[in-house]
Every structure is written in structure tokens, then in C-alpha cells.
């Protein structure tokens, strides 16, 4: 996908042009609910990048948008999705993480290092392996925790 095609999809999903390309610490949130059909090429592109890694599970956080990313990637890759949610300081796993799973931690954008670190810790505590981390939009927090993450959009000049 071209940079321009991705930019148009992010805008159709509710992100502002200025915020998407600002390189801000907290990147603009994109919602696939704003353009479900237009979002499909994003999932296909990310799934293609992940396919050679033979993931067996997707793990996502509690945000609706992240759950949609996980569901869409799980559908493209034919693997189950596990969601991790926080309530009163406790993390709860909705689904399973099996010992030996090759897990992709996925989201729209990881705005806070602690969120990504917690998701990775849940995977590792389940005796599974983080095969990859992916997000639609790159962020400083993402690069700080997982420098080799797979992203489709990097804020800033192209």
C-alpha cells in the first residue's frame, strides 16, 4: 500500500490530517468503525507482513479499536484473539494464552509504554512467545518498548 492510500484510510476512520502526521507522543486514534470496507486493505497488509512468522494467536488490549484490529487480523490469519482488560488494577485475560503460542501483540497505536509492556508480560507469563508487535500507527512508546514493531504509518515527513 502506498503512503497516500494509508493516509486516506486513516482520515476516513476519523483521524485528523494534522494529528495523523504530527509525530505527537500520543498519535491520533483511528477507528475502523468509521470506514469498515476501507480498513480491510490495512488488515491484509499487516497480515501479509505477519504470515511468515506463523503466529498462533493475537493478543490485544481493552480499547474497542484494538479489539477490532485483533479480530480483523485474527480473521485474516485464521488464528484466535485474546483480549487483556484492566479492572481495579488487575489484568484479566478474555480467552486463553497457551504455552508455546507464537503471539502477535496488536493495536491501533500504543500511546503508553506501560500498556505495551503489560501485554507483553501477560504473553510471557503464559509461557508463550511474542513473535511480533504490530500497530497501524507508529508511536514513540511503541518504538521505545519494541523497536522492530511492524507498522503501516509513521508520523512525520515522508
Image: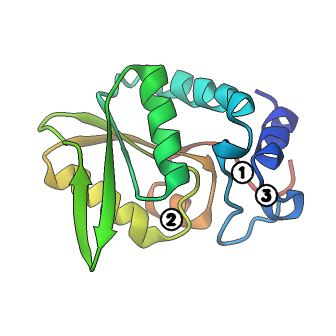
The answer to whether residue 79 is left or right of residue 69 is: left
Give the Cα separation between the discs numbered 1 and 2: 14 Å
On the question of residue 71 being in view, the answer is yes
Which numbered tag is attached to residue 126?
none
Sequence-wise first label, 1 or 3:
3
Horizontally, residue 136 falls left or right of residue 47, namely right
Observer-side mark, 3 or 2, equals 3
- State the residue lying farthest toward the bottom: 88
**Residue labelled with disc 2:** 144
Question: Where residue 133 sits in the image (x, y, percent)?
Answer: 44, 45
- Asked if 88 appears above or below 97 in the picture, the reply is below
Query: Sequence order check: which comes first, mark 1 or mark 2?
Result: 2
- Residue 14 image point, x, y percent: 77, 53
Mark 3 highlights which residue?
Answer: 20
Name the quadrant of the N terminus: top right
58 versus 121 height, above or below: above
Q: CA distance from mark 3 to mark 2?
A: 19 Å
Is residue 107 visible to the viewer in this orientation of the structure? no
- Image marks 3 and 2: residues in contact by CB distance under 8 Å: no
Amino acid at each position: 500500500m502506498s503512503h497516500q492510500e494509508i493516509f486516506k484510510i486513516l482520515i476516513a476512520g476519523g483521524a485528523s490530517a494534522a494529528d495523523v502526521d504530527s509525530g505527537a507522543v500520543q498519535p491520533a486514534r483511528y477507528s475502523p468503525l468509521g470506514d469498515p470496507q476501507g480498513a480491510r486493505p490495512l488488515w491484509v497488509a499487516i497480515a501479509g507482513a505477519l504470515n511468515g512468522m506463523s503466529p498462533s494467536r493475537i493478543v490485544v488490549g481493552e480499547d474497542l479499536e484494538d479489539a477490532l484490529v485483533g479480530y480483523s487480523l485474527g480473521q485474516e490469519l485464521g488464528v484466535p484473539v485474546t483480549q487483556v482488560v484492566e479492572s481495579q488494577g488487575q489484568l484479566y485475560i478474555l480467552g486463553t494464552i497457551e504455552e508455546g503460542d507464537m503471539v502477535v501483540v496488536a493495536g491501533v497505536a500504543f500511546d503508553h509504554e506501560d500498556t505495551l509492556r503489560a501485554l507483553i508480560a501477560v504473553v510471557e507469563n503464559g509461557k508463550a512467545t511474542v513473535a511480533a508487535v504490530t500497530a497501524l500507527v507508529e508511536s514513540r512508546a511503541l518504538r521505545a518498548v519494541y523497536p522492530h514493531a511492524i507498522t503501516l504509518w509513521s508520523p512525520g515527513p515522508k
